[in-house]
Image (tube, rainbow, N blue to C red):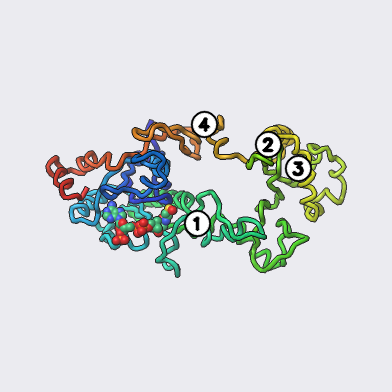
Amino acid sequence: MTKPLEGIKIIDFTHVQAGPACTQMLAWFGADVVKVERPGAGDVTRTQLRHVKDVDALYFTMLNSNKKSLTLDTKTAKGKEVLERLIRESDVLVENFAPGALDRMGFTWEHISELNPGMIVASVKGFSDGHHYEDLKVYENVAQCAGGAASTTGFWDGPPTVSGAALGDSNTGMHLAIGILTALHQRDKTGKGQKVGVSMQDSVLNLCRVKLRDQQRLEAVGYLEEYPQYPHGEFGDVVPRGGNAGGGGQPGWVLKCKGWETDPNAYIYFTIQSQAWPNVCKALGREEWIEDPAYSTPIARQDKIFDIFAVIEEWLADKTKFEAIDILRTFDIPCAPVLSMKEIANDPSLRKSGTIVEVAHPTLGTYLTVGSPIKFSDLDVEVTASPLLGQHTNEILTGLGYNQQEIAELHDENAV
Ligand code: CAO
C-alpha cells in the first residue's frame, strides 16, 4: 500500500523533542525523513538519560522512529556542499536550532530558496519572530511558563506548576506538522515553497485558550463561577490556579477511591455534567437531589460542590477505581480512572489500537513507545526502529550522486 506522504523528502535538522516529534509523525505517514546529525555526536538525546551503557537512550529512540540518519558537519565546506545537494532534491527542511543558528551556518532562507524555490523551511523557536524574547533558547518548562500553562496549573495555595505532558515540546511539533502539511498543500497550487514558523510559547498558549477566556470573564464580572474559589474564596485580578476543576462548564474533581492511602493513583476523575446530574444522583443513591432546588441546578450546587464530592468519595471508599468506573459507565457519567504509566504500558486496549507499541531495536532490544494517536481507515501506521548514528550516511550520499571515492574522502575529511 502506498503511504500518504510517500515521495515527500524531508531534511530533518531537528534535535531534542519539539522538532523530532514533528518529523517522526511525518515519517510514520510515509515521508522520507533524513535526520542530519553532527558526526561523532548526533542528537544530544542519544546519550541523555541512558539506561543501557553506550546504547541510544529511549529519549532518542522514542522520538526518531521510521527515520534515516545522515552524519554531516554542515560547518565544513564539503558538508555544506552535501547539504546543498540534499536541499536541491528535498521538499521540506525542518529545524529547531537556537535562533539564528541556521543563518550562522550559511543557510539563510534566501540561500535555501535560491537552491530550491519549492523548499518549505519549517522552524520551531521558543518565541516567535520579532518577539521581545526572540533571542532566547527555550526548553519545555520554560515554554509552559511563558505560554500561560504554569500560572494556571496547580493549586491556589501552591506555586505555578508545570504539566507532565510535553505542551512545549511535542505539542509544538504537532503544530509544526500541521503547518508543513498546509504549506505542502499550498505548494501544490502555487509551486512555491515558504517559511513556516511555530513558537513554543504560541503553541502552549493555543492550548490555554480557555484561560484567556477566563481572564476576560474575570475582568468583566470579578469572579469565575466554575472555579473552586467560587463562592467561598477570593478572586484577584488574574485567572487563579483552579486545582482539578474542569476547564469548561462541567464541574469535576479528582476523587479518592479504595486504596488511596497506599496507591498514589487510586483516584478517578468525576465530572458532574449538567445533563448527567439525575444519573449521578441515581448512582449515588441520592435520588432526592434530582428535584431538590438546593441541588437541581449547577449554580445551586456550586456553593456545596466540595460537600457533594465528599459524598461521592464516601461512595467510592469501598470501590477500586476500576470497579467504580464499571458502575458509573452504566449510568452514562463522564469519568475515568487516573492511570499510572505502568497501567498505560500494559493496557490491552492501547496495545490493540497501536497507541502503545513494541519496537525491536538492534542495540537497545525491544522497547515500548507511543504509536500514532491518529487512526486512519486506510493506513496502518507501522513504527520501526530509530536509526543508529550515521546508519544511512553512505546510502544517502550514493543517492545524491557521490561515488565510492568521493564518499571515502568525505569520511576522511570528517565532513560526514
Ligand atoms: N553540523 C555542524 N554544526 C551543527 C550541526 C551539524 N550537523 N547541528 C547543529 N550544529 C550547531 C548549530 O549550528 C549551533 O552552532 P552555533 O551556535 O555556532 O550557531 C550549535 O550546533 C548548537 O545548536 P543549538 O544552539 O541549537 O543547540 P543548544 O544545545 O545550544 O540549544 C536548544 C538547544 C533546544 C535550547 C536550542 O536549540 C533552542 O532554543 N531551540 C529552539 C527551541 C526548541 O526547539 N526547544 C525545544 C527543544 S526540546 O526541549
**Mark 2 = which residue?**
321
Question: Are the two marked residues, 4 and 2, in contact with CB atoms closer than 8 angstroms?
Answer: no
* Position above or below: 57 against 16: above
Q: Earlier in the sequence, mark 3 or mark 4?
A: 3
* Position above or below: 350 against 49: above
Q: Position of residue 71 (x, y in %)?
A: 26, 46
- Amino acid type shown at disc 2: Lys
Residue 141 is marked as 1
Mark 1 → mark 3, Cα distance in angstroms: 33 Å
Secondary structure under tag 2 reads helix
**Number of other residues with Cα within 10 Å of mark 1, as a class: few under 14, some 14 to 19, many 20 or more:** some
Q: Earlier in the sequence, mark 4 or mark 2?
A: 2
**Number of other residues with Cα within 10 Å of mark 2, as a class: few under 14, some 14 to 19, many 20 or more:** many
User: Is residue 353 something one can see in this rendering?
Assistant: yes
Q: Residue furthest left?
A: 405
Residue 381 falls in which quadrant of the image? top left
Residue for point 41% across, 32% down: 366
**Mark 4 = which residue?**
351
- Amino acid type shown at disc 1: Asn
Side of 246 relative to 368 (left or right):
right
Ligand 1 falls in which quarter? Answer: bottom left
**Mark 3 = which residue?**
313
Q: Position of residue 121 (x, y in %)?
A: 34, 55
Q: Position of residue 41 (x, y in %)?
A: 29, 48
Residue 153 falls in which quadrant of the image? bottom right
Secondary structure under tag 1 reads helix
Secondary structure under tag 4 reads helix
- Amino acid type shown at disc 4: Arg
Q: Earlier in the sequence, mark 2 or mark 1?
A: 1
